Image (cartoon, rainbow, N blue to C red):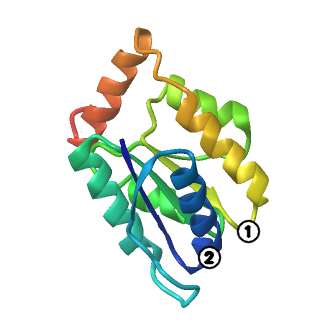
């Protein structure tokens, strides 16, 4: 599986560490930038990863200062379930119960070791299905204006 990654300037250094970690762990990585710490606008990078994930049924990782802006932007794209996490339980449960497909991490709020642990925990967790399928269907309906 190819994992899409991107960051804005506030998450650039963390993205680089994640890219290296993913390669070393045997994952194929599609890096959508940014490629320096020069100021950029995060929605552009969230969109690149979000559309890739939505179109390819893949996973993505987005980094910014807090992870929040990237999450907000990525969740605007149909089919994306982006989650900001800062603890291993949340990283695991967002995959098991919500089938999240984009992990958002904040460089300014997480240390590198914790960020990589959260990434590994998220990647190793699997969606449980079952009763959670009904909830995912309701999330999909929200994307198309079907639930009010």
Residue at x-position 21% and y-position 48%: 55
Q: Is residue 146 left or right of residue 97?
A: left
Query: Quick one: 114 or 100, which is closer to the camera?
Result: 114
Q: Which residue is mark 2?
A: 10
Q: Is residue 1 above or below residue 3?
A: above
Separation of residues labelled 2 and 1 (CA atoms): 7 Å
Query: Which corner quadrant of the image does residue 132 belong to?
Result: top left
Q: Is residue 29 left or right of residue 68?
A: left
> Does residue 27 appear anywhere in the picture?
yes
Query: Which corner quadrant of the image does residue 57 belong to?
Result: top left
Residue at x-position 64% and y-position 35%: 121
Point out which mark residue 108 bears: 1
Q: Is residue 127 above or below residue 36?
A: above
Q: Secondary structure at mark 2?
A: helix
**Residue that extends furthest to the bottom in the rendered view of this protein:** 38
Place of residue 74 in the rendered image (x, y in percent of width and height, measured from the top left): 40, 57
Place of residue 47 in the rendered image (x, y in percent of width and height, measured from the top left): 33, 64
Which quarter of the rendered picture does the N terminus lie within?
top left
Disc 2 + disc 1, Cβ < 8 Å: yes
């Amino acid at each position: 599986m190819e994992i899409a990654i991107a960051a804005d300037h506030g998450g650039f250094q963390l993205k680089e560490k994640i890219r290296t970690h993913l390669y070393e762990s045997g994952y194929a990585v599609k890096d959508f930038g940014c490629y320096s710490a020069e100021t950029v606008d995060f929605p552009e990078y969230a969109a690149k990863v979000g559309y890739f994930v939505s179109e390819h049924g893949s996973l993505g990782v987005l980094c910014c200062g807090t992870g929040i802006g990237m999450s907000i932007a990525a969740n605007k794209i149909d089919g994306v379930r982006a989650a900001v996490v800062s603890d291993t339980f949340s990283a695991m449960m967002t995959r098991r119960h919500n089938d999240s497909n984009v992990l958002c991490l904040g460089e300014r709020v997480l240390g590198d070791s914790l960020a990589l642990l959260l990434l590994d925990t998220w990647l190793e967790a699997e969606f449980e299905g079952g009763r959670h399928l009904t909830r995912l269907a309701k999330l999909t309906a929200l994307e198309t204006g079907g639930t009010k």
